[in-house]
Image: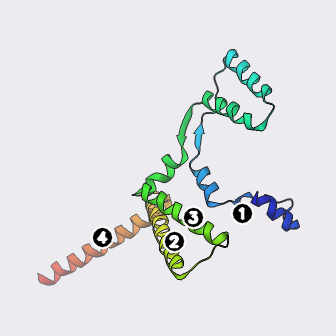
């Protein structure tokens, strides 16, 4: 919906994929919470006939969901993106999700031109600050757990240099006292 409006209003975007540019936080979270399935489906003729009959029997778009749900059940779920990659980055995922909900509600309130007063502004600023703290902490945790090989080598070299300096100072002190 947003992508269509952008392309309609800005003709130079007509041949550009603006979906990421126009994604809402709600849609982004839906993506992050998606399940990932295997690429294999059982090669059983009866299941394939049933799938084919369900798909070709669909005459209305609203009935497509039941066929899609049936297809999804034929695959094996490998993992959920949120559960595997994102949730471990938050010490309190439930509190993060509540903070996210508050942030989205506040953003929507402002985006839809609702009235604001000082109290609402202060509440939104507080909610936004809380949301940012969760995100910054998750980023710190991710960065500390996912260092590149070069970073690890650099940190190791720094630690070795510090140890060398400490041992040199100790040796100098011992040499001075003797």
- The residue beneath circle 3 is 105
**Nearest to N terminus: mark 3 or mark 1:** 1
Indicate whether 108 appears above or below 64: below
Residue 128, label in figure:
2
Q: Are marks 3 and 1 in contact (CB under 8 Å)?
A: no
The residue under label 1 is: 21
Evaluate if marks 1 and 4 touch, with contact meaning CB atoms under 8 Å apart: no
Q: Tell me which numbered mark, 1 or 2, is placed earlier along the sequence.
A: 1
Horizontally, residue 29 falls left or right of residue 159, namely right
Query: Going by the picture, which residue comes out furthest to the top?
Result: 46
In the rendered image, residue 140, in percent from the top left (x then y), is placed at 45, 65
Residue at the image point whose x is 80% and y is 62% from the top: 5
Above or below: residue 116 compared with residue 140: below
Q: Residue at x 62, y 76 (%)?
A: 115
| Of pointers 3 and 2, the one earlier in the residue sequence | 3
Q: Nearer the viewer, residue 60 or 175?
A: 60
Q: Quadrant of the N terminus?
A: bottom right
Q: CA distance from mark 4 to mark 3?
A: 52 Å
State which quarter of the image contains the C terminus: bottom left
Tell me the CA gap for discs 1 and 2: 21 Å
Q: Is residue 17 above or below residue 51?
A: below
Mark 1 or 4: the one toward you: 1
Q: Mark 3: which secondary structure?
A: helix
Distance between mark 4 and mark 2 Cα atoms: 43 Å
- Crowd band around label 4 with a 10 angstrom C-alpha radius: few (<14), some (14–19), many (20+): few
């Amino acid at each position: 919906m947003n992508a269509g409006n952008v392309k309609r209003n800005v003709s130079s975007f007509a041949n550009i994929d603006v979906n990421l540019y126009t994604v809402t936080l709600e849609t982004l979270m839906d993506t992050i919470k998606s399940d990932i399935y295997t690429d294999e489906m059982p090669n059983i003729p009866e299941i394939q006939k049933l799938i084919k009959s369900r798909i070709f029997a669909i005459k209305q778009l609203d009935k497509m969901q039941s066929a899609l749900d049936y297809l999804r059940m034929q695959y094996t779920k490998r993992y959920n993106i949120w559960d595997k990659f994102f949730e471990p980055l938050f010490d309190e995922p439930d509190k993060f999700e509540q903070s996210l909900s508050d942030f989205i509600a506040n953003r929507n309130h402002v985006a839809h031109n609702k009235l604001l007063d000082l109290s609402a502004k202060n509440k939104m600023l507080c909610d936004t600050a809380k949301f940012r703290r969760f995100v910054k902490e998750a980023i710190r945790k991710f960065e500390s757990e996912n260092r590149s090989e070069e970073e690890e080598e650099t940190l190791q070299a720094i630690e070795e240099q510090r140890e060398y300096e400490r041992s040199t100072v100790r040796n100098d002190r011992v040499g001075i006292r003797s």
